[in-house]
Image: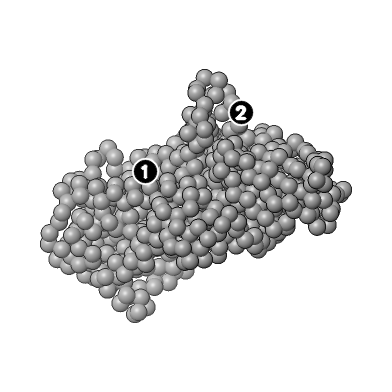
């Protein structure tokens, strides 16, 4: 009887320790991710030619500023330079894709933002290494209300947690 | 649960056809030649050059997918490894009685995957620090250097020493191929043991060579780790005792009889480079570079010593942290299962392989995002290459934007991939723990810390990929 109780308590301790380790490390990872993404926000003012000019710097793996605010109907010009290796700078919804090289500022054509209010992804379009898929920024058009999309990573995390939990329960119940 | 493709007569005839591998290599060699020409002579921007777009998106993506369905099938058609073999054998496909090689045995201390893993890490450093995949010229240079190295090693050492011990991708390809639904093995181990004194699959005979990778399909080879599917053993086996079987994915991960530490470290590298290493580099590269610039002379990227060193340090830290996390989980598992059971080192060696699918599916998720966003580029650069071979200048500074999926659908697809990787890893971990521990409660207790690590790495991937949605 003691042996069974000992096994159960070991199992409980293992579950507790594992959960504590995951929580702690996940918290640290989340903090690192949040601090890495540039949340620096920029709202350009129109120049004498009526065009809103935005200067952006690209690096492995992010853009500064990380959030650019414009209004629907604005005409925007992007001046983009790379701080390190070759990157791309694309906003698919606006239909343009610039290729960047270090030490040279690339100027986009004047682009009219004919997009409904919302948040659009700016991404690197040149495969630039292991963190390439995280090299993104946001173009916020108008007064975009908090998007449902921002909840999706949390929902995906909860779903993953549930799937891993379900697997563990099934594994524990499986008869030899 | 498995089906032997070699039981199908056309497959059997094709794979026993002597020039089979040579004919499979030819189209790949032609493509590689076009890639090298385009990279060497074409426009010097990775986004406009056919060679770089093809190599680092199409080839890389196909390679990752091939691990799932075909194991090391790339090695079957790889012209880089073939060059060394052709030079050594003085023949493209037939059994030659002559050789141009010295056929030296590979040094005993180097008969493992440590050197290959170190070269893989060096390749990653060159890629992420110096922008190897970011430069058409460097991409061409890499292919040429690897081909020359293969030829040189083929002249010095026996069999495919380059492919087994030196190719920077061999450990990466081998570990990921453990997941494959395809395996080449002996059909009946008893036949090999008792009825086959000649062991032609390993030693070769008058018409075929022994396994080029130095494996023994009729004996110790129990995983896909080093099988390049060259089918030499299929041709050489006098008992027709080699099968090419379809099987449930990932079986090697938990069925491996003697997991080695070198392969285990390679598996940790695969999982770590897809998860922890990019996180640390993403989070700390600018700050680390700034700190190093205070003590090292700065240059113009990519020739910027502080940045090169920062990438090296963060990658080393990322891979070290991944190994540390797995070893920490092994200690927890051992403690949870009860003292006096399986040593932590054994748990580490067994369980490390189970994390390979997690890394593989994360890398697939990374590339899926790029492919969905930049699909139009491939059409542009291919058209440019055809109109202006090999310089492909016609793109003219712009590439077409074709978005196959928006950010949310793309993220959901990525989530599905990461979840698939996690579930395969959990399943493999559970099977491994059940095999290592006689007691089911002890197995479950040992499984939990490992499962926790799998969950953590998956969440990390989900958050990094979803950072732009937040």
- Closest to the observer, A75 or B22: A75
Where is residue B177? Give x, y as percent: 44, 56
Q: Name the element at disc 2.
A: helix
Q: Are marks 1 and 2 in contact (CB under 8 Å)?
A: no
Q: Residue at x 48, y 49 (%)?
A: B44
Report the residue marked by disc 2. B287
Residue B132 is marked as none
Q: Residue at x 49, y 42 (%)?
A: B131
Given the current orientation, which residue lies at the most extreme top position?
B295
In the displayed structure, B92 sits above or below B107; it is: below
Instruction: Mark yes or no: residue A46 visible.
Output: yes
* SS class, disc 1: helix
Give the answer, above or below, for where A64 lies relative to B411.
above
- Rendered image quadrant of residue B415: bottom right
Mark closer to the observer (1, 2): 2
- Does residue A36 appear to the left or right of B327 in the view shown? right
Q: Chain of mark 2?
A: B
Residue B153, percent across and down? 25, 47
Image position, residue A139 (x, y; %): 76, 48
Left or right of A101, for residue B402: right
Residue at the image position 64 percent from the left and 48 percent from the top: A89
Disc 2 crowd, CA 10 A, few/some/many (<14, 14-19, 20+): few
Nearer-N-terminus badge (1/2):
1
Q: Position of residue B67 (x, y in %)?
A: 46, 58
Image disc number at residue B116: 1
Camera-nearest residue between B203 and B426: B203
Which of these two is toward me, B128 or A45?
Answer: A45
Q: CA distance from mark 1 to mark 2?
A: 31 Å
Name the residue at 30% across, 77% down.
B13
> How many other residues sit within 10 Å of disc 1, few (<14), some (14-19) or many (≥20)?
many
């Amino acid at each position: 009887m003691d042996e069974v109780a000992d096994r159960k308590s070991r199992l409980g301790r293992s579950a507790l320790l594992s959960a504590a380790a995951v929580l702690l490390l996940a918290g640290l990872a989340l903090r690192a991710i949040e601090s890495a993404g540039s949340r620096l926000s920029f709202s350009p003012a129109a120049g004498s030619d009526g065009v809103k000019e935005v200067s952006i710097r690209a690096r492995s793996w992010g853009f500064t500023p990380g959030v650019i605010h414009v209004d629907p109907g604005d005409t925007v010009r992007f001046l983009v330079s790379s701080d390190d290796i070759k990157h791309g700078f694309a906003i698919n919804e606006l239909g343009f894709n610039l290729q960047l090289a270090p030490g040279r500022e690339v100027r986009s054509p004047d682009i009219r933002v004919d997009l409904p209010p919302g948040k659009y992804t700016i991404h690197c379009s040149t495969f630039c290494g292991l963190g390439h898929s995280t090299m993104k920024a946001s173009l916020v058009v108008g007064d975009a209300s908090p998007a449902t999309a921002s909840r999706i990573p949390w929902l995906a995390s909860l779903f993953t947690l549930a799937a891993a939990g379900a697997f563990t329960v099934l594994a524990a119940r499986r008869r030899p | 649960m498995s089906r032997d493709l070699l039981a199908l007569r056309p497959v059997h005839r094709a794979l026993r056809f002597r020039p089979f591998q040579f004919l499979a290599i030819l189209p790949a060699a032609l493509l590689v030649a076009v890639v090298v020409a385009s990279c060497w002579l074409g426009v010097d921007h990775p986004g406009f050059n056919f060679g770089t777009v093809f190599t680092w998106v199409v080839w890389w993506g196909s390679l990752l997918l091939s691990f799932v369905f075909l194991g090391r099938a790339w090695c079957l058609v790889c012209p880089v490894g073939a060059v060394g073999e052709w030079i050594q054998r003085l023949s493209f496909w037939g059994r030659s009685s002559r050789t141009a090689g010295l056929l030296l045995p590979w040094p005993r201390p180097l008969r493992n995957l440590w050197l290959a893993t170190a070269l893989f890490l060096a390749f990653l450093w060159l890629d992420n620090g110096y922008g190897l995949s970011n430069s058409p010229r460097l991409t061409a240079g890499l292919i040429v250097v690897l081909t020359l190295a293969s030829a040189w090693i083929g002249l010095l050492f026996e069999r495919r020493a380059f492919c087994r011990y030196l190719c920077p991708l061999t450990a990466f390809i081998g570990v990921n191929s453990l997941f494959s639904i395809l395996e080449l093995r002996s059909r009946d181990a008893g036949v090999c043991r008792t009825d086959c004194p000649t062991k032609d699959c390993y030693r070769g005979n008058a018409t075929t060579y022994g396994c080029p990778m130095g494996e023994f399909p009729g004996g110790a080879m129990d995983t896909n780790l080093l099988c390049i599917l060259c089918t030499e053993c299929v041709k050489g086996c006098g008992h027709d005792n080699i099968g090419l079987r379809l099987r449930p994915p990932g079986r090697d991960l938990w069925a491996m009889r003697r997991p080695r530490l070198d392969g285990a470290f390679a598996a940790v590298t695969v999982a770590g480079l897809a998860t922890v290493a990019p996180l640390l580099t993403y989070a700390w590269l600018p700050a680390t570079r700034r700190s190093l610039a205070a003590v090292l002379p700065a240059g113009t990227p990519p020739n910027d010593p502080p940045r090169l060193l920062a990438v090296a340090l963060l990658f080393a830290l990322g891979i070290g942290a991944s190994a540390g996390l797995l070893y920490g989980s092994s200690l927890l598992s051992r403690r949870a299962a009860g003292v006096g059971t399986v040593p932590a080192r054994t748990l580490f060696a067994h369980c490390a392989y189970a994390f390979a699918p997690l890394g593989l599916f994360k890398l697939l998720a990374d590339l899926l995002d790029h492919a969905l966003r930049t699909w139009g580029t491939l059409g542009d650069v291919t058209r440019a290459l055809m109109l202006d071979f090999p310089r492909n200048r016609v793109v003219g500074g712009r590439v077409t934007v074709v978005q196959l999926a928006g950010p949310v659908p793309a993220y959901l697809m990525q989530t599905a991939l990461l979840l698939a990787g996690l579930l395969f890893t959990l399943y493999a971990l559970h099977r491994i723990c059940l095999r290592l521990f006689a007691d089911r409660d002890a197995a479950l207790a040992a499984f939990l810390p490992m499962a926790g690590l799998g969950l953590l790495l998956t969440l990390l991937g989900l958050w990094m990929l979803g950072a732009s949605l937040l």
